[in-house]
Image (cartoon, grey):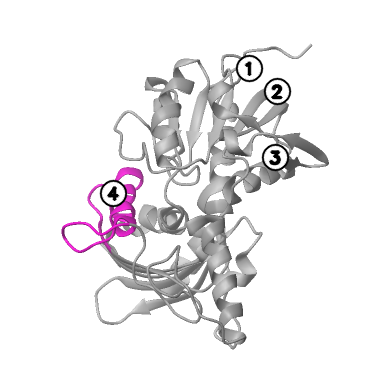
Amino acid sequence: MVFKVAVVGATGNVGREMLNILDERGFPVSEIVALASRRSQGTEVSFGDKTLKVKALDTYDFSDTDIAIMSAGGNVSKEWSPKIGKQGCVVIDNSSAFRTDPDVPLIVPEVNPDAVEGFTKKNIIANPNCSTAQLLVALKPLHDAATIKRIVVSTYQSVSGAGKEGMDELFTQTRAVFVADPVEAKKFTKRIAFNVIPHIDVFMEDGSTKEEWKMVAETKKMLDPKIKLTATCVRVPVFIGHSEAVNIEFEKPITADEAREILREAPGCLVIDKHEDGGYITPIESAGEDATYISRIREDQTIDNGLNLWIVSDNLRKGAALNAVQIAELLIARGLIQPKKQAA
């Protein structure tokens, strides 16, 4: 079976990565369509060795399209995902628009694949926040083994999480520092070059940012509503790759060696954990890779049943584009979707 697939937001960082991953993984497409806003109409994007001309979202007919992978932002998704779903096209949405909707499954295939069957209520499936996706890939097998009670996470999130504008701002500011030009902050609230900013997304009434709240809400929805989580999310001057320092308290005893063995066998995880110089993963090594890397696995001696982990992943891939494509693959593997047009 082959499927007609539309990528919405095809000119953005994540949209382009989605096209790359669909090609890399040999996704069974009969036709691939690149969509974006009218101002991007006619722009060229790559799909393998093909060049696609971008079409306008607001004039496209989804009635013969099987899957729409959305990466065009929350406002666009709120307007268009329900419309697309009503045309019988399954939407896999990368924005935050539907993540907390009880009628929309929030999916990481390595974590909660069975929940995908709930997509029929609205024909929409939500992709989690990039920082949550990699966290839960690593935590799911440990939760199954020893039951997580509480998580404390500090994130070190790359500028690509803020889109092309974020990457451009880091580049421009870094160059300005070296040539002694004025440094302007436009995308971020403070200078990002040679700095870190403890502020991602908007502030909420309790002093948390929305990025931090997302990690709490999404972990409870996908992994276990009883888990307590507190997060501090920080933007760092890295182009690609989110890192997380994670402290976990379990209900049952679990040693660092046991955790290491569990994670080595877990889908989507790659353990790089040598107690030596360079025996761990940093963001630059994760860029372009599919795995969620886990390093610095060690016991926390200050609490019973505690572990510390260092988790790194390419936020444009597992944190966004790869996870969305894996959801589409999951739908096909479970026979939950049939192509509207049968191949000749």
Can you identify the residue that label 2 sits on? 2
Residue 342 lies left or right of residue 118; in this view the side is right
Q: Which numbered dot is residue 43?
A: 3
Q: Quick check: marks 1 and 2 in contact, CB under 8 Å?
A: yes
Q: Residue furthest front?
A: 182
- Give the CA separation, mark 3 to mark 1: 28 Å
Element carrying mark 3: loop
Residue 339 badge = 1
Tag 3: Cα neighbours inside 10 Å, few (<14), some, or many (≥20)? Answer: some
Q: Is residue 273 visible?
A: no
Q: Are marks 1 and 4 in contact (CB under 8 Å)?
A: no
Q: Quadrant of residue 136?
A: bottom left
Residue type (three-letter) at the residue carrying disc 3:
Thr
> How many angstroms separate mark 1 from mark 2 (CA)?
7 Å
The CA distance from mark 2 to mark 4 is: 35 Å
User: Is residue 283 on the magenta stretch?
Assistant: no
Tell me if residue 213 is in the magenta stretch.
yes
Image quadrant holding the N terminus, namely top right
Question: Percent position (x, y) of residue 158?
Answer: 50, 66
Relative to 84, does residue 138 appear above or below in the rendering?
below
Could you tell me how far apart the alpha carbons at marks 3 and 2 are, in whole angstroms? 26 Å
Residue at mark 1 to residue at mark 4: CA–CA distance: 34 Å
The residue shown at (54%, 71%) is: 170
The earlier-in-sequence mark between 3 and 4 is 3
Give the class, few, some or many, for how many residues have Cα within 10 Å of label 4's Cα (few <14, many ≥20).
some
Say whether residue 106 is left or right of residue 44. Answer: left
Please tell me which of labels 3 and 1 falls first in the chain. Answer: 3
Asked if disc 3 and disc 4 are in contact, CB closer than 8 Å, the reply is no
The local secondary structure at tag 2 comes to: loop
Task: Determine which quarter of the picture holds residue 244.
Answer: bottom left
